[in-house]
Amino acid sequence: MSEQEAPHWVTSPKGDAHVLLVPYLEALKQEYRNTRLIWYETFVGMYSDMQDISLIPSRAVGPMSPVMNKYAVPINVICPLVDTAEARITSARPRPFFKTVGGSWSKQRQAKRLQKFADGIFDETKAYRIGQQALKDAALLGTGCVKVFRRGGKIRAERVLISDILVDEALGFDRNPHELGEVKEVSRAKLLAEFGDTEEKVAAIKALHSMGSRLNGLYQDMVEVYECWSLPQGEQKGRHVIVVGGGDAPGATLLDEEWKRDYFPIIFLRWRNGPAGFHGLGLAHQVMATQVEITANVRNISKNLHLHTNPRVLNPVGGNLNPNHITNAWGTVLTYTPPFKPELWSPQVVPPEVYQWFIMMYEKCFEMTGLSTQAAFAQKPSGVTAAKAFRNLSEIQDARLAPVSQRYEDFYLDFVTACVDEAEELYESGEDLEVVAGSSRQAERLKWKDVRMPKDDYTIQLFAANFLSRTPSGLFDDIEDLLNLQLIDQDTARKLMDFPDLQQVFDEANAARDNFESQIEKLLDDAEVFPPQPFDDLQLGIKIYRNAYNRARLDDVPEDRQELMRTWIEQAMAMVQASQPPPMPQGAPPQQAAPAPQMQGA
């Protein structure tokens, strides 16, 4: 059989994928992963200022003393760049919205329930926290990875290092490979507990070469496990396997199942796409050469400072100045014999051009990456005092980071899509996923069977909730602008003031609005009606009900629900009218105020 006709692991019999797959993955490790691992560990070392650092658990060692580390970076540029990019971009929390495709009112209500369910999944999986880590990995390593999977009837999300990803870079040249692998070191005991259900698997796991080491008398028994996916290709079904093997170990296929989706469960977030190839390029890669130049420059400056900053005394040959008389004592008298007069010599330590070169290189790092030193060190630019001017400068920087921000938002679009598919697959397997969703004041339990919708009935759109400023002072300025433009009222302004220390005050102030909005939700969902009460803020209620009624007309809400809303508005208006004083008859003289009572004896 020729090389072109060699069998592929996807076509191997069920349970035998390890026979062809393990040697293939071992080759990918040697060909691609091990070389890139050097780059990744260099980036992490430069960021954390540690020389001996590893991204593989079995190779991890304790860091050397920073005092003894002669390769320490004197002035670290990569660290503030990565941290600033992380803080700048992840301050926005993109939220996916489910929109019906020409759907009826009932489908629109179902889409809102699906929206709540997705919000609950985001809370349970800590989506924004793990997305923040992925963005940081992208800035540092070029590519951040998050794996979405199900375990114990729940949806999980975990960080995956790009150094653990195995991909044939020829297949991933356009960033869309149809095969993907992950290598991971796990405890042998954990692997036996999870997959040791047959004698063959137990024997294969026990025969694996240990990657661990002995630490404090305890043996860290770690072994390598491979997980691989192949996407469906035409008539060829997709496949998902977990295999072990390599070396003298016989190997085994621990899991072998069909993979139905047309995407991998690992979501990738790249800081910057290269001209071609699967892997992204990060901030560390972009400024590494300049960081090396800065480090060499600063070390040279440091050597010159140590060598030349102390002044010298020039004692001519034949001079009789006693060197022991040169001390740091006050009022020391030095005697010498003319014409041999000693001279104090303070040479120029470092030419000013060297400092200028250093400053230029340091600022160039921020300029290349679209960040600023002011943002990195929380400094306000000189001469900028107005809040609006400062916001304009912030918007300019955000424009430079727009491509990365767009990829960060797309990451959450892929994330929620994977979560929805995981929930549906759980349901098809007989498990009904349940999440807790709701606001800070009220939460409810939602089951997937009650919110699920056919994919053709909705589309997912993403909006970044970052219109308003992220600082308290900036938020006040933004809301003040909206009030001045009469785009919002005082009640809405209070709703936008989301400060924990004011939350109780605003909750009380917004209680009436929240009560009416809750009533409308129950009216639309279950036709449950709460008649207006005399002690309600009826003027506010009429306004909120009218807005909801107009929205209901646009959304083709069933006529019975609209009638309930009209009835409520009419009842409230009648109660308001009844509480008004009777009008004065036309032509009647104005009533005179009763004379004030006089005190006796006045």
Image: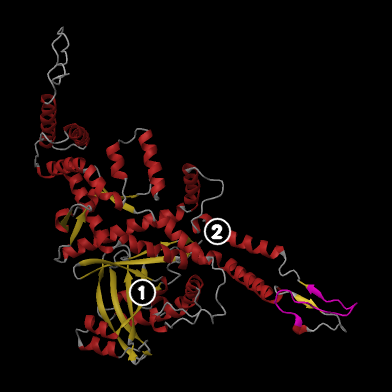
Place residue 361 in its image quadrant.
bottom right
Q: Report the front residue among 8 and 35.
A: 35
The quarter of the image holding the C terminus is top left
Nearest to viewer (mark 2 / mark 1): 2
Q: Which numbered disc covers residue 366? A: 2
Place residue 424 in its image quadrant.
bottom left
* Colouring: secondary structure
Instruction: Tell me, yes or no, if residue 337 can be seen here.
Output: yes
Which residue occupies the extreme right position in the image?
339
Q: Give the percent coordinates (x, y) of residue 338.
A: 90, 78
Residue at left offset 42%, top offset 58%: 87
Residue count near mark 2 (Cα–Cα under 10 Å), binned few <14, some 14–19, many ≥20: many
Q: Is residue 140 left or right of residue 123?
A: right
Which residue occupies the extreme front position in the image?
601
Is residue 17 on the magenta stretch? no
Magenta region, main secondary structure:
loop
State which region is magenta. Answer: 325-344
Q: Give the percent coordinates (x, y) of residue 41.
A: 48, 75
Dot 1 amino acid type = Glu
